[in-house]
Amino acid sequence: MAFTSSVHASGRAGGRRQKTPPPPLDQAALDALALTYVARFATSSGRLADYLRRKLRERGWAEESPPDIAALVTRMAERRFVDDAAFSAAKGESLRRRGYGARRIDDTLNHDGIAEPLRAAARGNETERRHAVLAFARRKRFWPYSGEPCLDPAMRRKHLAAYLRAGHGLDHVRRVMDARDLSDLEEWADEHE
């Protein structure tokens, strides 16, 4: 077996080059980062601002005057590259389809920097919230999708906790857990239409 050295002809251990740190950002580079980000991801104004602040912390700023992130985000919104209303509506709908409740939707959108009026609209109406709790039960295979009601008190507490962590209101959760059957719940979910 031949002995191989970890020092290559280049003189570097392991043959790896040291990465040179990227240069500090200037206004043109910051604009390019923002454009690249909004082109790749559906995002909100708050998420874009957070991304740009993180990049500035990582790379630094090369110009004398401080960067105006708020103005850059506003320009992106004016050009409709960032649309908080569309983002929050789509995100709310997606979360409801996956079975998440109003509180979880509100927390997620708040984290994304969405203003309260848009978060309120994204939480959905009563019918949409009722369908979301049924979607959660279906996804988790809880009653009535499990085939038989859960009568074990310890298991009922676990199911209740899972519903509450998913952001559903206690009134909706109890209605689902105490339902006679699936048709009863489907009728309840469509009452407000």
Image (cartoon, grey):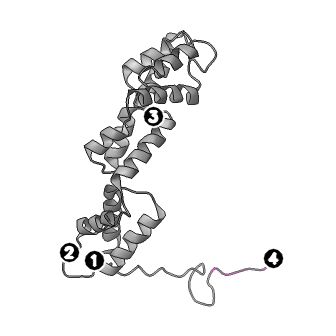
Q: CA distance from mark 4 to mark 2?
A: 60 Å
Q: Position of residue 19 (x, y in %)?
A: 48, 79
Q: Is residue 183 above or below residue 31?
A: above
Label 3: element kind? loop
**Quadrant, the C terminus:** top left
Dot 3 amino acid type: Tyr
Front of the two marks 3 and 1 = 3
Q: Residue at 40% across / 27% down in the picture?
A: 168
> Mark 2 highlights which residue?
66
Q: Is residue 4 magenta?
A: yes
Q: Which mark is residue 100?
A: 3
Please tell me which of labels 1 and 4 falls first in the chain.
4
Dot 4 amino acid type: Met
Q: Quadrant of residue 173?
A: top left
**Quadrant, the N terminus:** bottom right
- Answer yes or no: do the residues labelled 3 and 1 have beta carbons within 8 Å? no
Q: CA distance from mark 3 to mark 1?
A: 41 Å
Q: Is residue 80 magenta?
A: no
Front of the two marks 3 and 2 = 3
- Answer yes or no: do the residues labelled 1 and 2 have beta carbons within 8 Å? yes
Label 4: element kind? loop
Please tell me which of labels 3 and 1 falls first in the chain.
1
> Mark 4 highlights which residue?
1
**Magenta region, mostly helix, strand or loop?**
loop
Bin the neighbour count of mark 1 within 10 Å (Cα to Cα): few under 14, some 14-19, many 20 and up.
some
